[in-house]
Amino acid sequence: MSTSRDTQRLTEAELRDWKPSVNPWWVAVSVMLATFMVVLDSSVANVALPHIAGNLSASTDESTWVLTSYLVSNAIMLPAAGWIARRIGRKRLLMISIVAFTAASLLCGMAPNMPMLIVARILQGIGGGGMQPLAQSILIESFPPRKQGTAMAVYGVGIVVAPVIGPTLGGWITDSYTWRWIFYINLPVGLLALFMVSLFIEDPPYLRRAFQGAIDYLGFGLMAIGLGALQLLLDKGQEADWFAANWICCLAVVSAIALVGFIVRELTDREPIVQLRVLGNRNFRVGTLLTGLFGVILYGVTAMLPLFLQTQMGYSALDSGLAVSPRGLGSLLAMAMMGVLVNYIDNRILLACGFTLLGYSTLLLSHINLGISIGSVIVPNFINGFAGGLLFVPLTTLTMSYLRREEIGNASGIYNLMRNIGGSIGIAAVTTNLVRGAQAHQNYLGANLAAGNPIVGTLLQGLQARFQAGGASASDAHQKALGAIYRSIQQQASLLAYADNFRLMGFLALLCIPLVVLFQRKKTH
């Protein structure tokens, strides 16, 4: 009995006093490089989909599986990464993930057809899902509590900035070279990340001991089915008109049953693949909820604005990417500031300021119209990006501050999964609201265009006269005038739908502010 207690005390001492043998900033750069590559690749392919479809002789619907396959495999791997790391070691798993991601990137670039590309993207998602939570837990364990905020600011550059520059970079590469290079650019980055990880990363003492627990096959199977079905439902729901399609209803039922079974299994199994009991920690529970909501807003807004600029304002993919690029500059500035401020200001105050700015900037975007200048896009985007950078560091450090070191790997998987699921929900919500909101506004605007309305009559006569002056006959001019009015109604209806969505996201950000008070103050020792 005494030997067991001595071993336990030794373990606790090792966990408390352990620190990496190299400068932890080399650790930070190593994991940030891997994370940046993964998060960038989740968005860089979006603008290249039409080119991919055309080159591989696939339909637009088929090409969207390039994104869906990645998201599904990534979602399944995220919560499982901590469990696998306990079995084979965190460093080994991180290196395997980098190799898998980099090799899959090469296969993506070489893919001769769509099925091959989808398989390669699934492998990419598996590799990427292993890297994100591992990088976060490695960073937190490598730095003392007083420096964790600064370290998370470095890590946050990859998480927050990469989705912003991804569409711009993807558009430039696709326009200047070929879509295959959006995957080939991962090769040098992956090789450098692999070299740095092999050189600077090491496992803490508790991961150096062999893990002898049984494999939770049932838990993993339920998790894979539940998360896979949920991701498919969110990604394809709008295309299939949601629950009007039988297969979407089936996916919803399968996902619900599998996820409920997964939760029951993980709470009752002695060696669960995901330690859901970590949600009993108050800060982690609140932080997981907030990062999910943050994902809804972040991904929802970043998906809408380039779409608005391209479909309503006539911007090219590259120009729309450049127009929203100040968001990345705002994030970088905030990250640089957070590296210092997070150590001196109550993190809850920083969070409240971040959500306030996020809500304000998103509400500014709700005032868009078809005559806006580029400045009306740049300023709200810069503030929005600054708010995102302001939120990421204190949210992560507060969420993880009361967890034991051996819990952080598992917790990071859950935390990252919730942000990604939140992002999928945000994108699904805004795309659905854009379509249905535009229809509702079009019906309302059309109902006010009565034939006897003198304003409508004057507009119709003016358009007819313009078309007749261009050489059209009276009947053709009348038809063209009616068509021009209808197109104007469609455009205005779409504009109102975009404004509604930005307003919704802004209010959601402001509603997050009261939740901040539920956090306990961050530990500083």
Image: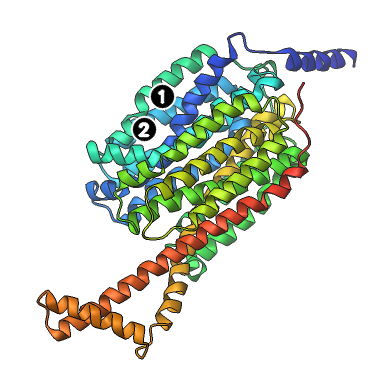
Residue 351 in sight: yes
Amino acid carrying label 1: it is Gly
Locate the C terminus and report the quarter of the image it occupies.
top right
Q: Nearer the viewer, residue 452 or 74?
A: 452
Q: Which element type, helix, strand or loop, lies under badge 1? A: helix
Residue 490 in the figure: left or right of residue 3: left
Q: Position of residue 271 (x, y in %)?
A: 71, 35
- The residue pinned by badge 2 equals 105
Q: Nearer the viewer, residue 204 or 459?
A: 459
What is the spatial separation of the Cα atoms under label 1 and label 2, in whole angstroms? Answer: 9 Å
**In percent of the image, x 54 and y 48: which residue is there?**
361
90 on left or right of 432:
right
User: Please, which residue is most extreme toward the left here?
Assistant: 471
Residue found 47% across the figure and 54% down from its top: 235
Q: Give the color scheme: rainbow, by chain, secondary structure or one colour.
A: rainbow
How far from the left and from the top, in percent, is residue 82? 62, 31
Give the left or right position of residue 360, taking residue 44 as reference: right
Considering only vertical position in the picture, is 303 above or below 176? below
Residue 118 in the image: state x and y as whole percent: 37, 44
User: Can residue 229 be seen here?
Assistant: no
The amino acid type found where label 2 is placed reads Ser
- Determine the secondary structure under disc 2: helix
**Residue beneath the point at 41% across and 39% down:** 325
Task: Give the residue at mark 1.
Answer: 190
User: Would you say the residues marked 1 and 2 are in contact, meaning their CB atoms lie under 8 Å apart?
Assistant: yes
Q: Is residue 351 above or below residue 371?
A: above
First in sequence, mark 1 or 2: give its number.
Answer: 2
74 sits left or right of 4 in the view = left
